Amino acid sequence: GHEFIGIVEYAPSKELIGKKVVGEINVGCGKCEYCLKGLERHCPHRTVLGILKRNGVFAEYTTLPEKNLYIIPPDIKDLEAVFIEPLASSFEIAEMVHLEPDEEILIFGDGKLGLLISQVMKYYTKEVILVGKHPEKLSLANKWGIKTFHLDQIHNIGKFKYVIEATGTQNGFLSAVSHVRPRGYLILKSTTAQGTLLNLSPIVVDEIHLIGTRCGPFKPAIEALKKKYIDIKDMISEIYPLKEYEKAFLKNDDKSSVKILLRI
């Protein structure tokens, strides 16, 4: 658990107590070359909330340094604020790659992250195309004015300068590679944990730029929600109390689900 909104119960700065906050999940050592450049997410000694050596938010209390916290403006609802961390990850794409406004962007993956990325990318390029295999999720993107294709319908879709992979699967990666034009950009937003052999020859032959991007800036994500640029109301599939966590995890395994929340 690392995507959250919570209330500060204790802090050295008294003005934070009682405030609703979200938090940057990476906690650096504060001393290495990356931390000194503001890149705590790459600190070799970092802890990561709910992921690496730091307990997450499936509990009544968790801890983060004050500098990691962002106070939620009153015009952002709780159910919107819980999306700030993955939304920030979506904005990181524009931090890593210069996106030309007259180019199209092709996105693979219609899960929560792919849906958020598709909304964010609308503000950087003339057209966004989302590829997935879940009709109910693709219909969400259609409501936001995003062109969609089922995975089985992309044989003649062509190649693109910018392709974003957000499926988390080997097949998703291979499909994404095959749709990048020579000297284009393949932007990886998901981690494929399984050990697999990949043919990287097309990346070399077509001189494709391979970009990995992970966590991102909270401020533009907060601003986008504040100005209602991002629509998340239909992305919450279910909310469970903590005592029903087993039901929540089972529901999360349902491929039709987008975002499952635990209320603690």
Image (cartoon, grey):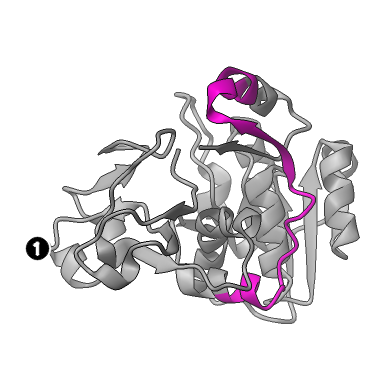
What amino acid does circle 1 point to? Lys
Q: Mark 1 — residue?
A: 31
Q: Is residue 240 magenta?
A: yes
Going by the image, does 168 lie left or right of 119? left
Q: Nearer the viewer, residue 32 or 171?
A: 32
Q: In which quarter of the image is residue 160?
A: bottom right
Where residue 130 appears, as percent x and y from the top left, is 78, 53
Q: In which quarter of the image is residue 33?
A: bottom left
Residue appearing at x 64%, y 20% in the figure: 247
Residue appearing at x 31%, y 56% in the figure: 41
Q: Quadrant of residue 58?
A: top left
Q: Give the quadrant of the N terminus.
A: top left
Q: Which of 196 and 149 is in front in this view?
A: 149
Q: How crowded is mark 1: few (under 14 residues within 10 Å), some or many (20 or more)?
A: few
Q: Does the magenta stretch include residue 72?
A: no
Q: Which residue lies furthest to the left in this view?
A: 31
Query: Is residue 69 depicted above or below 197 in this figure?
Result: below
